Amino acid sequence: MAEYDFERLSVLIVEDSLFIRSLLINSLRILGVGKVYAVDHGGQAIDFLKKVKNDPMSAGTQEVDIVMSNWQMSPVDGMMLLRWIRRHKESPDRFVPFILITAYSEPKRVTEARDLGATEVLAKPFTITAIGEKLVSIIEKQRQFVHTRDYFGPDRRRRIVPIEFEDRRKLNDKSPGVEIVRG
């Protein structure tokens, strides 16, 4: 794992289990993350993100650099939070890297998270090294964002593979429209 100084990094943890939440907080602190905020579920995360946007002084931070959220929570789960961040008009930062945490890491679930706009998926049980690798991946392998009628989020293609045909992700009169928003 590359050596980074995460002191200026701000991470929001969204986790309903007090035990897992404390593991994540302590793991991020061991990695040197400077600001760690934690809430119990997605609804509280939405309130916190709105507060950061509207009143950063009382929120205690100017911005949230990364959101780490459990998938299954109540009343607002991680997927609902991710959908709000990526698609809602009140979302303060649709581009914020989002790490979805789940114990159900079979390929179908990872694909579902990817298709909703998750930047990374962290499987439980996790290690400090795995968390660090996700942070490094977000820094070193930034992906462009794609906007279509049905999707907004990081480009789902992780590898750059040469193609033998015209790239269909270009906007034109015949396609439903694909836009590279930020690269």
Image (cartoon, helix red, strand yellow):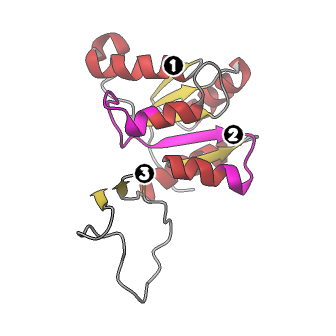
Give the residue pinned by disc 3. 150
Question: Looking at numbered disc 3 in the image, what kind of residue is underneath it?
Answer: Asp
The N terminus sits in image quarter: bottom right
Compared to 160, does 135 lie above or below? above
Using the numbered discs, state the Cα–Cα distance from disc 2 to disc 1 in whole angstroms: 18 Å
Q: Badge 2: how crowded within 10 Å, few (<14), some, or many (20+)?
A: many
Q: Badge 1: how crowded within 10 Å, few (<14), some, or many (20+)?
A: some
Question: Looking at numbered disc 2 in the image, what kind of residue is underneath it?
Answer: Thr
Question: Looking at numbered disc 1 in the image, what kind of residue is underneath it?
Answer: Gly
Left or right, 124 with reference to 136: right
Q: Position of residue 27 (x, y in %)?
A: 63, 33
Q: Residue at x 67, y 30 (%)?
A: 72
Query: Can the viewer see residue 183?
Result: no
Q: Helix, strand or loop at disc 2?
A: strand
Q: Badge 3: how crowded within 10 Å, few (<14), some, or many (20+)?
A: few
The magenta segment? 84-109
For residue 43, the mark is 1
| Among the two numbered marks 2 and 3 on one chain, the one whose residue lies closer to the N terminus | 2
